[in-house]
Amino acid sequence: MGKYIVRRLLMMIPVLLGVTFIVFFIMSLTPGDPAAIILGDQASAESLAQKRIELGLDKPLLVRYANYMGNLFRGDLGLSYRNQLSVAKQVWDKFPNTAILAIAGILVALLIGIPVGILSAKKQYTFMDNSSMVLSLIGVSMPNFWLGLLLSLLFALKLGWLPSQGMGSGFFGLLRSLVLPALTLGTGVAATVVRMTRSSMLEVIRQDYISTARAKGITEKQVTNKHMLKNALIPIVTAVGLQFGHLLGGAMLTETIFSWPGLGRLMVDSITSKDIPMVLGAVIFMAVMFSFVNLLVDILYAFLDPRIKSQYKGRKAAIRKEVTV
Amino acid sequence: MKKMLTVLLVLLCSAALFAGGSAESSKPAATGYKDTITVGQGADVTSFDPHIGKETPAVAVTNHIFDTLVDTDPVTGEVVPQIAEKWEVVSPTSYRFFIRKGLTFHNGEALDADDVKFSLDRAIASGSVSYIVDFIKEVKIEDQYTVLVTTKAPYGPTLRNLAVPFAAIVPKDYVSANPDILKTKPVGTGPYKFVSWTQNDNAKLEAFEQYYKGAPQTKNLIIKVIPEASQRTIALETGELDIVYDVLVSDMKRVRENKNLTLLEAPSLTCFYISFNMRKPPFDSQLVRQAINMAIDRQLLVDTVNSGTGAPADEIIAPAVYGYYSTGVWEYNPAKAKQLLAQAGYPNGFSATLWVNNNQSRVEMCQAIQEMLREIGITVKVEVMEFGTFISRTTAGEHDMGYFGWVTSTKDADYTYYSLQHSSQQGAPGNRSFIADPEVDRLVMLGRTSADTKVRDAAYKDLAIKLKEVANNAPIIYTAITAGANKKVEGFVLDPIGYHRLETVKVSK
């Protein structure tokens, strides 16, 4: 297992190299002069030229890439073009806010998605199943910006229960301000979780071992939780893990609608102002987060399914055997 | 599964504790007025350094922290004293400023002539804002409270340029110790002092009790960033915000109809216009340019595309700008426009492109103009491009027609006329119609170099008439500055420039 984790961590290096290469060249080759964007259309030609030199844009593209990578290996993500502040600090400052929203969003998704998915599977083709499938289809299709505005209109404006925007301070202030963005973010993911849970539950629900479990006389709750759900969890964990990885990179729309100061908004602002170091920094961070979440999901498989754990052990034993021979 | 949920809950709670700061102190003062004004705007501050951060959202915050030598009155537009309590015009190229004694910066440093010289020299050296102050040749310290500003040539708008927030006075010792410090820890002499900045969230300011005009009416000022315009309106309706800037056209009705809210509107200093590239046929023909001007129904554009906000433009400077002279909006007359085209040798019209940057409202305006021009036989292709590309390609003169916006930031006609109409300013500085007319140049320079307002007024009147005849640009609309406010807000005045000072504002409980 340890070797597997180390190997996976090492595999992140080519992934990150690929990501920086692609993003750097896409951002640099798209039309638009960052100096003109920063200084605006009323700046003089001399100021523009000076700004380009300051930003290092007068150097050839490959030289700029090499310089960037050199700094990156020294742990320096550079300064933002837009505000001349440290990219690493800005990303790191925004990450806790995004993490809070992502965790809350996933929590909402799991709290809605798993129970509804289980019920749908167990009561297949009933009214309950059909209506939950329709609702989840709506949930998947409904754009976040629209749902967010509707929730704001209802809970902030009409009922006055919750703040319409911003990130509250203090523990309870924060929780209150978290409800609407987390619901907005979570319902979309919940819809995916419902459908995934339902289909993977349906796969195990008619297996012989479920009949055996029931024949042993254990309660239906135990059958569902210990025998069905545990065996159905692997695809659900995969789907949730992927979604969580996405959310950790910042939920751009939800963060924008609710003025949530997270990575997603930082990213949108940076892309529109062609702030290449900032975009690169945020994307690298996002890629690292995504890889970590994927790794965690893979490790989680081993705990959920003893067969996978034994595969790791088996591989280890086989290697040992080979070495001994 | 339960374990997983528990882990997530624990993670969430610990993250919330980790991120949660101390609870906000927004207790109302005992006077019957709130002790905090909360304002919402669409974008964040890029830099708190007044010699770098020049976008409206940045200045909306920093103009409370910093003062300038002189100021312009938001209502009358007149130049009034600020850090300089008085001034005298020594010669057409030199101005003497007498600095108010006893002024201190928020960090306790006393302000004197040294700080003024340092600040103006710093602004001149800044790539971002030098264009406002690069008319200055030298700032000479005469004594501790007197400076002499010498200009490179006689320059009429000197005082108005020095009133622009980009010419802010900053503390020399504080900035010299760390030239980057103002980006995140600004210190000035303005009515509010900086408290904190949470990027993409809010900037908090606190009243500066020693402000020379007296402490601001409200102790705390919070400027929140809410990029989604509808959410800004909702937050105003719920009472989370006292004032919001830039109300969306589609939200205006809601604000007007809400008995607790007021919608404030004022003409801005921004004009949107089409520049014809006079280097390219058929736009080298004055008749063609006049015909296009005549084929555009500006009132219809205001009423439809702009949903009734703003006003039809007759000049590239707005009425609130010093030097504006009304020549009357171009008459909408497609039949006469067709005649002019025929006279110019294009009885069947022609095809051309209209370039615009990727801003939705600008694109919609161009699409409407495209249809209007089709009526007189001109087939226009609207080409949308990213802002940087738009600027660099129009600077190179590759366009037929370009749709531009221009803000007369100094509230003085020279700022716009010199950049957009003088032959020396072709390309990047702003003249993208590539006009090079000796009479236009003469009038621009007359207005620019004279300190006599009578001479300037006459020059700008003649210039406006001449430019209408030359028609190198087609002025389209003047935009409006909008803000929504709770009816409990008192003393709020909209400044046509778009950034408003709030030291006189108070909000009743």
Image: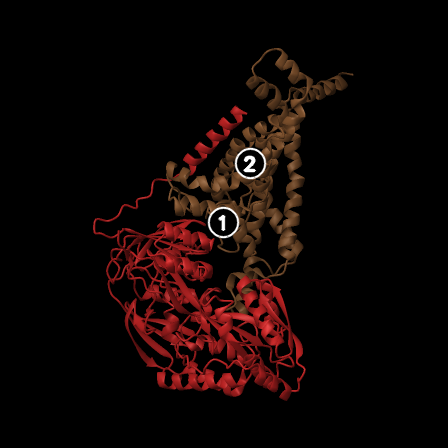
Which quadrant, please, contains the N terminus of chain B?
Answer: top right
Residue indicated by mark 1? A256
Given residues A130 and A174, the one toward you in this image is A130
**Within 10 angstroms of label 1, few (less than 14), some, or many (20 or more) residues?**
many
Residue that lies at the very extreme toward the right in this rendered image: A325
Mark sitting earlier along the chain (2/1): 2
Compared with B183, A255 (above or below) is: above
Compared with B306, B11 (above or below) is: above
Q: Which mark is residue A302?
A: none
Q: Colour of chain B?
A: red
| Element carrying mark 1 | helix
Q: State which chain disc 2 sits on.
A: A
Q: Are marks 2 and 1 in contact (CB under 8 Å)?
A: no
Instruction: Give the alpha-carbon distance from disc 2 to disc 1, as whole Å.
Output: 21 Å
What amino acid is at disc 1? Thr
Q: Left or right: where does residue A203 sit relative to residue A52?
A: right
- From the image, state whether disc 2 or disc 1 is nearer to you: 2
Q: Position of residue A21 (x, y in %)?
A: 66, 48
Q: State which chain disc 1 sits on.
A: A
What amino acid is at disc 2? Ala
Is residue B452 at all visible to an observer of this figure? no
Given residues A45 and B274, the one toward you in this image is B274
Q: Position of residue A263 (x, y in %)?
A: 51, 45
Residue that lies at the very extreme toward the top in this rendered image: A216
Q: Residue at x 67, y 54 (%)?
A: A62
Could you say which quadrant of the image residue A177 lies in?
Answer: top left
Q: Position of residue B291 (x, y in %)?
A: 58, 82
**Chain the render paints brown:** A
Given residues B433 and A260, the one toward you in this image is A260
Given residues A8 and B9, the one toward you in this image is B9
Could you say which quadrant of the image residue B176 lies in?
Answer: bottom left
